[in-house]
Image: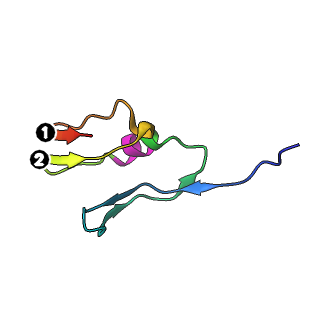
Amino acid sequence: MVKKKHCIKNNLITSPQHKVLYLSETYDGSVHDITIVHEEDWLFPENIIVYQDTGFQGHVPENVQII
């Protein structure tokens, strides 16, 4: 039997030099990454490259290149 683990999560945005640019509020581990984006209404500078994983599928900010 697997015991449930209580987890928390934050979303983090860093620069290519690994400088923390944004740290989200802390959420329960069951909250999806994309839900955090929608609740916190992230805005990005124009013409930047955003590397995102599958937890952000469907999130396509304007004037941003997604990889």
Verify whether residue 39 appears in magenta. Answer: yes
Q: Which mark is residue 63?
A: 1
16 up-or-down from 41: above or below: below
**In the rendered structure, which amino acid carries the disc numbered 1?**
Asn
Which sits earlier in the primary sequence, circle 1 or circle 2? 2
Per the model, the C-alpha gap separating discs 1 and 2 is: 5 Å
Residue at the image position 30 percent from the left and 46 percent from the top: 51
Q: Position of residue 39 (x, y in %)?
A: 40, 44
Disc 1 element = loop
Q: Main secondary structure of the magenta part?
A: helix
Q: Is residue 6 left or right of residue 11?
A: right
**In the rendered structure, which amino acid carries the disc numbered 2?**
Glu
The range drawn in magenta is: 36-40
5 up-or-down from 59: above or below: below
Q: Quadrant of the C terminus?
A: top left
Q: Is residue 47 left or right of residue 54?
A: left
Residue at the image position 74 percent from the left and 52 percent from the top: 5
In this view, the residue in front, 35 or 64, is: 64
What residue did someone put label 2 on? 46
How many neighbours does mark 2 have within 10 angstroms: few (below 14), some (14-19), or many (20 or more)? Answer: few
Q: Answer yes or no: do the residues labelled 1 and 2 have beta carbons within 8 Å?
A: yes
Residue at the image position 18 percent from the left and 40 percent from the top: 65
In this view, the residue in front, 22 or 65, is: 65
Q: Dividing the picture into quarters, in which one does residue 41 lie?
A: top left
Q: Position of residue 34 (x, y in %)?
A: 42, 39
Q: Quadrant of the N terminus?
A: top right
In this view, the residue in front, 62 or 55, is: 55
Q: Dividing the picture into quarters, in which one does residue 11 lie?
A: bottom left
Q: Residue furthest right?
A: 1
Q: Position of residue 57 (x, y in %)?
A: 39, 32
Residue at the image position 23 percent from the left and 38 percent from the top: 61
